[in-house]
Image (tube, rainbow, N blue to C red):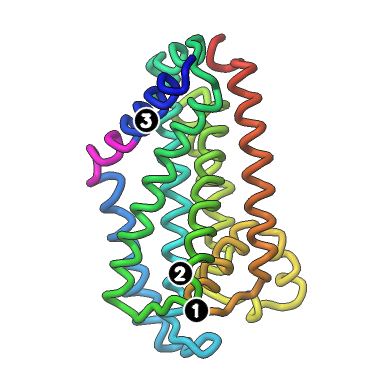
């Protein structure tokens, strides 16, 4: 295929993916904004007054980056897992796989859709956060870097989950039993400095902890984990999952069977 043909195919997949979640924005974009509002009302205003300051910031300021990151994680993942599984279920993906289109372009097309939804939801949730608290920016480049790497990573995870899922229930196993617990135990609502030493050590095995704290550092300049570790982890995981996703596409098992 020529470069122009590949470029056209890639942009077509991306446009289709973006239109898909924009068409049902009441289900894809509105819920994160409402959920974030409830978190601020319950945790930020009610519970936050009892907790007090966290590392020199109000509790609402402290949890705001975590809530934004939580929305980005969930929506980047959800967009790709639902879209790719839908393509499998309706038999559309087979046409892409057997076509001359490189598997890398197919993968990047779906991932870009998840990235677009993650970024858009992140912006919406940030705007909602500004109604409840002041949100300074300590380092914009760190914020952008972590958002892109995290969104890309969770989109890849959604793709792999959808590849193996055989039923609609199979799409919910990872969000319910893995992603949900890791997110809520990832320092969104607390600092791991508040935990006993043993649980601090256990928490450091949670990759979401690094995403949340790296993102929080970009806004507030504080973190429980080194920002450099966050970037190394995200880049490494992205590379591993990307190569594995390409391998799955080339193998084709579970799609062409």
CA neighbours of label 2 inside 10 A, class few (<14), some (14 to 19), many (20+): many
Q: Secondary structure at mark 1?
A: helix
Q: Nearer the viewer, mark 3 or mark 2?
A: 3
Q: Position of residue 5 (x, y in %)?
A: 41, 19
**Viewer-closest of 243 and 11:** 11
Q: Position of residue 121 (x, y in %)?
A: 35, 54
23 within the magenta span = yes
Residue name at image x 40 percent, y 38 percent: 113
Q: Position of residue 145 (x, y in %)?
A: 53, 58
CA neighbours of label 3 inside 10 A, class few (<14), some (14 to 19), many (20+): some
CA neighbours of label 1 inside 10 A, class few (<14), some (14 to 19), many (20+): many
Q: Which of marks 3 and 1 precedes in the sequence?
A: 3
Q: Note whether 135 is above or below 142 in the view shown.
A: below
Query: Which numbered circle lies on residue 65?
Result: 2
Count of numbered circles on the image: 3
Residue name at image x 30 percent, y 39 percent: 21
Q: Secondary structure at mark 2?
A: helix
Range of residues picked out in magenta: 18-26
Are the residues at dot 1 and dot 2 in contact (C-beta closer than 8 Å)? yes
Query: Which numbered circle lies on residue 11?
Result: 3
Q: Position of residue 198 (x, y in %)?
A: 77, 72
Q: Nearer the viewer, mark 1 or mark 2?
A: 1
Q: Nearer the viewer, mark 1 or mark 3?
A: 3
Query: Which numbered circle lies on residue 220?
Result: 1
Are the residues at dot 1 and dot 3 in contact (C-beta closer than 8 Å)? no
């Amino acid at each position: 295929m020529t470069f122009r043909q590949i470029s056209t195919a890639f942009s077509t997949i991306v446009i289709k993916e973006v239109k898909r979640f924009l068409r049902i924005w009441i289900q894809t974009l509105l819920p994160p904004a409402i959920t974030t509002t409830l978190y601020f009302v319950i945790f930020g205003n009610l519970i936050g007054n009892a907790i007090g300051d966290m590392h020199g910031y109000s509790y609402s300021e402290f949890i705001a980056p975590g809530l934004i990151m939580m929305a980005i994680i969930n929506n980047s993942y959800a967009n790709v897992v639902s879209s790719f599984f839908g393509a499998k279920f309706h038999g559309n993906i087979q046409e892409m796989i057997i076509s001359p289109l490189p598997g890398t372009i197919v993968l990047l097309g779906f991932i870009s859709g998840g990235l677009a939804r993650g970024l858009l939801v992140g912006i919406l949730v940030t705007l909602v956060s500004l109604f409840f608290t002041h949100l300074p920016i300590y380092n914009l480049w760190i914020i952008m870097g972590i958002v892109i790497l995290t969104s890309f990573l969770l989109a890849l995870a959604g793709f792999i989950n959808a590849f193996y899922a055989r039923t609609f229930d199979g799409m919910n196993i990872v969000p319910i039993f893995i992603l949900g617990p890791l997110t809520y135990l990832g320092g969104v609502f607390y600092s791991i400095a508040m935990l006993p030493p043993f649980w601090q050590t256990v928490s450091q095995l949670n990759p979401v902890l690094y995403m949340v704290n790296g993102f929080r550092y970009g806004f507030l300049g504080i973190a429980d984990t080194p920002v450099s570790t966050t970037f190394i982890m995200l880049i490494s995981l992205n590379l591993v999952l990307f190569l594995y996703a390409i391998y799955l596409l080339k193998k084709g098992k579970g799609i062409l069977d």
